[in-house]
Image (cartoon, helix red, strand yellow):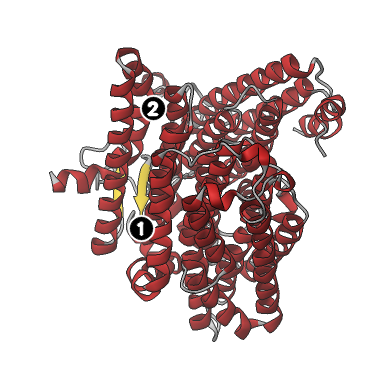
Amino acid sequence: MLIGFYAIIFRRNLIKIAMGVSIIASGINLFLIAIGYRHEGVVPIFTSAAIKAGEAQAKMVLPVPQALTLTSIVISLAVTALMLSFAVVIYKKTNTLDIKEIKEALNID
Amino acid sequence: MIDFLHQNGLALLIAFPLLSAFLIPLIEKISKSLRNIYILFAVFSTTSLAMFLAQSIFAFGPLVYTMGAQHPGLTMPSGLTIPVRIILLADAFSAFMIVSSSIALIASAIYSLGSVKRSLGKYFSLFFVMSASIFGIICTGDLFNLFVFIEICSIASAGLVAFRKEKAESTIAAYNYLIVSSIASLMILFSIGIIYGQYGVLNMAAVAKLIKFSFVDNFAIVLLVSGLALKCGAVPLHFWVPDAYGRAPSGISAFLVVASQASLYALFRVSFTLFGAFFLIKLLSLAIIVLGVLSMFVGVTMALAQKDIKKLMAYHSMSQTGYMLLGVGLGLYSINTPLSDVGFFAMAGGLFHIINNAMYKGLLFLTAGAIIYATGQRDLNKLGGLARKMPYTTIFFMIGAAAIAGLPPTNGFASKLLIYESAFIFNPILSIVALIVSVFTLVSFVKIFCSAFLGPERNEFKNIKEVPCAMHFAMAFLSVLIILFGIFPDLILNAIVKPAASALLNSLAYMGAVF
């Protein structure tokens, strides 16, 4: 995540900034998956837990964080796609991806 | 029918705009006029559903809808003690926000029907996705769904900010907006992960019941509050506001105000319901008050220096957000203190300001849009003498400007007076700052009025005409509401604002709706 923040703050290339955002998103996805970890847990499918149930109580990994991660992967895909398409539009208009050059080209303060 | 709506209304309120969003491109294939009729139908049925729901919440108390249960009211599956299903939950505060956003929805939709000239279908698809996500943010009772709706909202609104893609500026504004809001929502997601890791629940009421305020929780609170403050554009995190508001199509600027108010809703909901019993709540509320005062002051001083008409208004919407934060922050500060009565009035003022701001800020953005639509010019120094050509727009602008500066008999006066009076009792300095900000607001709107509407007629504007009647209708609708709310503030206060404020303060009732 910190690498992603570094990229967003210090990079001037639009595509690299978009990469930074998606690195942060992957970091958070990893964190969410790590929350669900249980030592020696099995796949959270009801039947597979039942098979193991013969040998004491089988532990399942938490299923909810996995669902959350799946959702957040989809969302971050959408965000990345939208950002990159904005970058393409900006490149078409200004012929550059560098923030400073874009500002000079458009006279934005 | 009424019973059915009463039970399933919350889900329909989100599902119906979402369905319309994807139906519109299909209907457009058949015929363009059919599409326009469908858009009008969808807007009116969404708002009437919203009004119906709000009315029944005010009358009968909080509404609950459990996704996937045999019966919508069944929050807990048999044998479980925590709510595991996704729950939609709306209390009086949510109802208040539903009313405020549906007013803005109807005005900006009608306005856009008049003002957007090409790819109207795509525009309204995004528009309905955005309104579905705003209603989602307001109605959800689930932390993760809050994140999902916030993210949908920012994607849809970034698409709308970039709608005029022939201009590179608007694309850049959308790019900035998307970066900022996705970082904000990733921070929110991170803190939701932390909370889930400790308590194993995502339902807001359940978290509020279980939360213990350990050190890690404090970290989550800081992340959550700063993420939401980033989304609603309070001052140290305000840099995306002027670009995004200034470059979006005007109908969307008016609706973006509502989108950032929905994040404001989430901020208040989280800080009152989730962290209401927090022992550092004084610190949190002081932080909100300081954010509010800073936003007010910085917003208005930066607005004074602007030449671009829509950027100027965007800075003003920052300073108006400051008023709401100030009012509600004072209410949060005064929980369980001798001043809690005064705090209640400050909160009522802050909340009343939310709905008022949605109206007059919307109206001002719409008039600015009308000026740009008619003249194609957004620089104040190059405008002038429009009052002769556009008399109606001038009148609407005057009403909006009076309301934002807090002059009677408009609604801005009513809510600002409440905030001044109660802030004075806490600390006179707060209300002095608020008054000064109000004066500066008046100054800058007088500046717009003089340079755009008064003065000699300019040669290049000889041939301009008034804008289409759909745009007039939307502006007139908002103006009438502003005046009505200003003349009968007591009616509105007692009917919707005070129930909302007491619902926000009474987090036990919110939990009671689930457990």
Q: Are marks 1 and 2 on the same chain?
A: yes
Tell me whether the residue at label 1 lies in contact with that at label 2, contact meaning CB atoms closer than 8 angstroms: no
Q: Name which quarter of the figure residue B503 lies in.
A: bottom left
Which mark is nearer the camera, 1 or 2? 2
Are there few (<14), some (14-19), or many (20+) residues within 10 Å of tag 1? many
Q: From the viewer's perspective, tell me whether residue B345 is left or right of residue A4.
A: left
Which residue is found at the position 64% from the left and 48% from the top?
B457
**Figure check: A78 above or below B138:** above
Which quadrant does the C terminus of chain B fall into? bottom left
Q: Nearer the viewer, residue B288 or A74?
A: B288
Which residue is found at the position 51% from the left and 39% from the top?
B465
Q: Position of residue B501 (x, y in %)?
A: 43, 68
Q: Position of residue B393 (x, y in %)?
A: 50, 50
Q: Position of residue B414 (x, y in %)?
A: 48, 73
Q: Nearer the viewer, residue B112 or B273?
A: B112
Q: From the viewer's perspective, tell me whether residue B301 is left or right of residue B12.
A: right
Task: Provide the secondary structure element on which disc 2 rests.
Answer: helix
Say what amino acid the circle numbered 2 marks: Ala
Which residue is found at the position 67% from the left and 46% from the top?
B383
The numbered mark 2 sits on a residue in which chain?
A: B
Lower position in the chain sequence, tag 1 or tag 2: 2
The numbered mark 1 sits on a residue in which chain?
A: B
Task: Provide the secondary structure element on which disc 1 rests.
Answer: loop
Say what amino acid the circle numbered 1 marks: Asp
Which quadrant does the N terminus of chain B fall into? top left
Q: Which residue is mark 1?
A: B91
Q: Position of residue B163 (x, y in %)?
A: 57, 27
Which residue is found at the position 60% from the left and 38% from the top?
B375
Distance from the alpha carbon under mark 1 to that under mark 2: 27 Å
Q: Which residue is mark 2?
A: B21
